[in-house]
């Protein structure tokens, strides 16, 4: 069993492993698709979670995304990075979900501390006090991210949480490069203003 | 360049290592003389540091231990995920074959029950049709007898009587045609 992929580990050898796994999954090899899910479940679920803002909905949507990926495997073209391809599918599913739950999305757009929720995180290696302080600060930062309009929030997540390059973001979202850069800059500016208001200087 | 401030593109490009060598040199030389752009860059860098730190620590959410297994099983058993049209067609053909086979096997195992049901239903239907047929047959036979009796009474006893009858018939036809032509003529005049 290979190591679990994180967004920062989309190295060339991982790309080759992805292609092999796709090929063997298409050939009907049992376990190949499960391995693909295992490699991408964490980055995709984190992306979806930040997009929809609800843990249970994120789990359901992540499952839906992987089922769609399985159904579309035959259409995957190996000249493209598998990670970018599945982010594109995840992006489409997340956008559909937000469109279906537009009322909820509106409430997310004007989110405040009062509707902040606790992020279900994996336990770290910090002392309980440090963990508590940082959890509080993270909660504030997550609230600021959630308060961004979805179109801006997604770009911040893809760029700074999932570490996608501009070119990959263009491919995933279908936006022109100039729009991506411009929106990212504006999103950072919005966040900076909110950080100043909340007195957040660093983690 | 030294007198004007950098564009947002340049600051963003610098932060994302997206400037070419000439653009980078130009931007860095501008930073040395422009405190406004330096502080803007420093603020952006601080923001990115904060974001990066927060996201690195929270880049994963806890998933159920068997999540990948469950997802893979659900994906592989999802018929809507049949990947190509030929796959779907093959699946449909197999479904039809298996459906037909199961119906045939079911019929074979339940043949005695089925034949009893068919027999019990067909018996009253047979009796009904038998009775109906007998009734129709008798009615037609009676009608034939009555018609034969009537026609026999109409047959003349001798040639003279027959010739007289024919003559009467011819006169009646001639009179009728004449009456009809008179009636039409009167209708046209009126």
Image (cartoon, coloured by chain):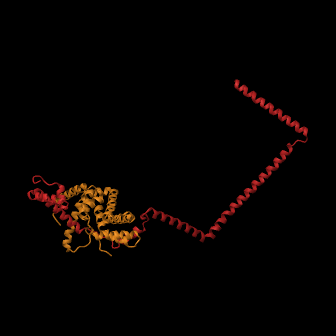
In the picture shown, does residue B42 fall above or below A37? Answer: above
| Residue B90 in sight in this render | yes
Q: Could you say where residue A6 lies in the image, as x and y percent from the top left?
A: 27, 69
Q: Residue at x 74, y 28 (%)?
A: B183
Chain drawn orange in the picture: A
Residue occupying the far front of the picture: B22
In the visual, does A52 lie left or right of B139? left
Q: Nearer the viewer, residue A115 or B15?
A: B15
Q: Position of residue A190 (x, y in %)?
A: 20, 57
Please state the horizontal and vertical placement of residue A119, each as a whole percent of the image. 26, 67
Is A148 left, or right, of B40 in this rendering?
right
In the rendered image, the quadrant that contains the N terminus of chain A is: bottom left
The image shows residue B3 at horizontal and vertical percentages of 9, 52
Q: Quadrant of residue B12?
A: bottom left
For image coordinates 74% across by 56% down, the residue present is B133
Q: Quadrant of residue B107?
A: bottom right
Q: Residue at x 48, y 65 (%)?
A: B90
**Quarter that holds the C terminus of chain A:** bottom left
Which one is in front, B139 or A156? Answer: A156
Q: Is residue B61 above or below residue A144?
A: below
Tell me the residue at 75%/30% (across/down): B180
Drawn side of residue B9 relative to residue B123, left or right: left
**Which picture quadrant has residue B154?**
top right
Residue A113 seen anywhere in this rendered image of the structure: no
Residue sitting at the far bottom: A1
The chain in red:
B
Outermost residue, top side: B189
């Amino acid at each position: 069993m290979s190591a679990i992929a994180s967004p920062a580990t989309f190295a060339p050898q991982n790309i080759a492993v992805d292609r092999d796994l796709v090929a063997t999954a298409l050939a009907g090899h049992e376990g190949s698709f499960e391995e693909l899910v295992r490699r991408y479940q964490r980055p995709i679920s984190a992306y979806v979670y930040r997009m929809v803002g609800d843990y249970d909905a994120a789990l359901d949507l992540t499952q839906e995304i992987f089922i769609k990926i399985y159904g579309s495997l035959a259409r995957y073209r190996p000249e493209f990075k598998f990670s970018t391809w599945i982010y594109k599918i995840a992006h489409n599913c997340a956008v559909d979900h937000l469109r279906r739950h537009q009322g909820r999305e509106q409430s997310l757009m004007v989110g405040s501390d009062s509707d902040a929720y606790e992020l279900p995180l994996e336990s770290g290696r910090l002392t309980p006090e440090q963990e508590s302080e940082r959890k509080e600060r993270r909660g504030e930062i997550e609230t600021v991210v959630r308060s961004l309009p979805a179109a801006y929030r997604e770009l911040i997540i893809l760029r700074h949480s999932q570490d996608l390059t501009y070119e990959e973001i263009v491919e995933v979202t279908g936006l022109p490069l100039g729009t991506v850069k411009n929106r990212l800059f504006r999103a950072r500016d919005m966040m900076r203003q909110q950080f100043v208001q909340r007195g957040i200087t660093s983690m | 360049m030294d007198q004007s401030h950098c564009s947002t593109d340049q600051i963003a490009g610098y932060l994302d290592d997206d400037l070419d060598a000439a653009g980078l040199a130009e931007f860095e030389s501008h930073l040395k003389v422009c405190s406004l752009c330096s502080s803007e860059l420093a603020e952006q860098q601080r923001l990115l540091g904060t974001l990066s730190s927060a996201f690195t620590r929270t880049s994963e959410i806890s998933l159920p231990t068997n999540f990948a297994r469950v997802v893979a099983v659900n994906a592989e058993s999802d018929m809507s995920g049949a990947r190509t049209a030929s796959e779907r067609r093959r699946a449909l053909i197999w479904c039809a074959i298996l459906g037909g086979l199961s119906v045939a096997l079911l019929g074979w195992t339940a043949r005695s029950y089925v034949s009893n049901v068919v027999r019990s239903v067909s018996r009253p239907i047979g009796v009904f049709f038998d009775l109906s047929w007998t009734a129709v047959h008798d009615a037609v036979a009676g009608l034939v007898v009555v018609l034969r009796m009537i026609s026999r009474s109409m047959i003349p006893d001798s040639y003279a009587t027959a010739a007289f009858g024919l003559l009467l018939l011819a006169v009646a036809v001639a009179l009728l045609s004449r009456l009809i032509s008179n009636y039409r003529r009167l209708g046209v005049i009126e």
